[in-house]
């Protein structure tokens, strides 16, 4: 398995981040850090309520900072697997906030970002908007049903753009469009086998599928 001590998994909604984080942590005897899904403003955000995007994003920013800054990532003797990177917060902020809101947000983000260490390895899971829509429907979270196809496409494009410029850690890019690590154990095992090899820079992995 990879020698990385701090591994983070990223990608758009319902691409399989948390499921992979738990499976990988079990395989390498790591502790997990799972992104919070609890946000008192999220329902209003999905309803496009006035000001809800800013309230939602600031809540996520503070919660993610508290979680990662208290995790002892720089001095942990046990491997750590997280299902997000801190930068995802800014990615969504720039998708959802007005220019004025983003300007306020950015001051807090820059201050917090300096205190959060980068992972050793990021696993970027990607999938087409159509596949993500199917997985959202299968998960059947009522609030997520309100997510528009346009917003889903914007999110996928934002992730693609972000990781085309990301250099803070080694990155393994995994196309999950034709595989499902949540539903198919063989697909998961194929990825775990790939992770037994070292990753340098940005590498791409296209699973064969079960």
Image: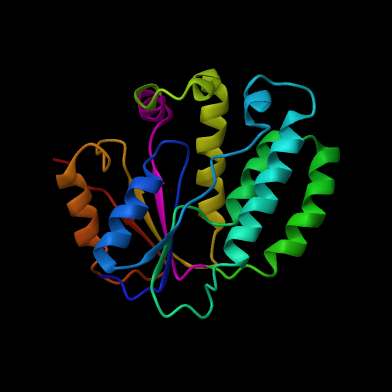
The stretch in magenta equals: 119-136
In this rendering, does residue 40 appear at all? yes
Question: Does residue 208 appear in the picture of this structure?
Answer: no
Where does the image place residue 43, in percent across and percent down from the top left? Answer: 63, 25
Residue 52, quarter of picture: top right
Number of marks: 0
Residue at 58% across, 50% down: 88
Instruction: Return the residue nearer the eye: 48 or 34.
Output: 34
Q: Which x, y percent locates residue 136?
A: 41, 26
Q: Position of residue 10 (x, y in %)?
A: 46, 50
Q: In this view, does 108 lie above or below 140?
A: below
Q: In which quarter of the image is the C terminus?
A: top left
Q: Is residue 97 left or right of residue 87?
A: right
Name the residue at 66% across, 37% down: 95
**Toward the viewer: 179 or 105?**
105
Looking at the rendering, which quadrant does residue 133 occupy? Answer: top left
């Amino acid at each position: 398995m990879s020698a990385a001590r701090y591994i983070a998994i990223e990608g758009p909604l319902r691409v399989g981040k948390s499921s992979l984080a738990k499976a990988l942590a079990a395989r390498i005897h790591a502790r997990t850090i799972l992104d919070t899904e609890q946000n008192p403003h999220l329902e209003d955000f999905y309803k496009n309520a006035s000001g809800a995007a800013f309230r939602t994003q600031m809540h996520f920013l503070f919660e993610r900072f508290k979680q990662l800054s208290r995790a002892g990532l720089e001095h942990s003797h046990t491997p750590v697997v997280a299902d997000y990177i801190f930068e995802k917060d800014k990615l969504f902020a720039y998708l959802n906030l007005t220019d004025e809101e983003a300007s306020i947000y950015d001051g807090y983000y820059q201050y917090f970002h300096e205190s959060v260490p980068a992972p050793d390895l990021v696993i970027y899971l990607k999938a087409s908007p159509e596949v993500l829509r199917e997985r959202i429907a299968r998960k059947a979270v009522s609030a997520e049903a309100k997510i528009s196809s346009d917003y889903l496409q914007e999110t996928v494009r934002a992730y693609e753009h972000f990781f085309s410029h990301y250099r803070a850690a080694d990155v393994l890019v995994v196309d999950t469009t034709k595989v499902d690590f949540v539903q198919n154990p063989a697909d998961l095992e194929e990825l775990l086998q790939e992770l037994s090899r070292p990753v340098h820079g940005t590498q791409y992995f296209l699973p064969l599928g079960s």
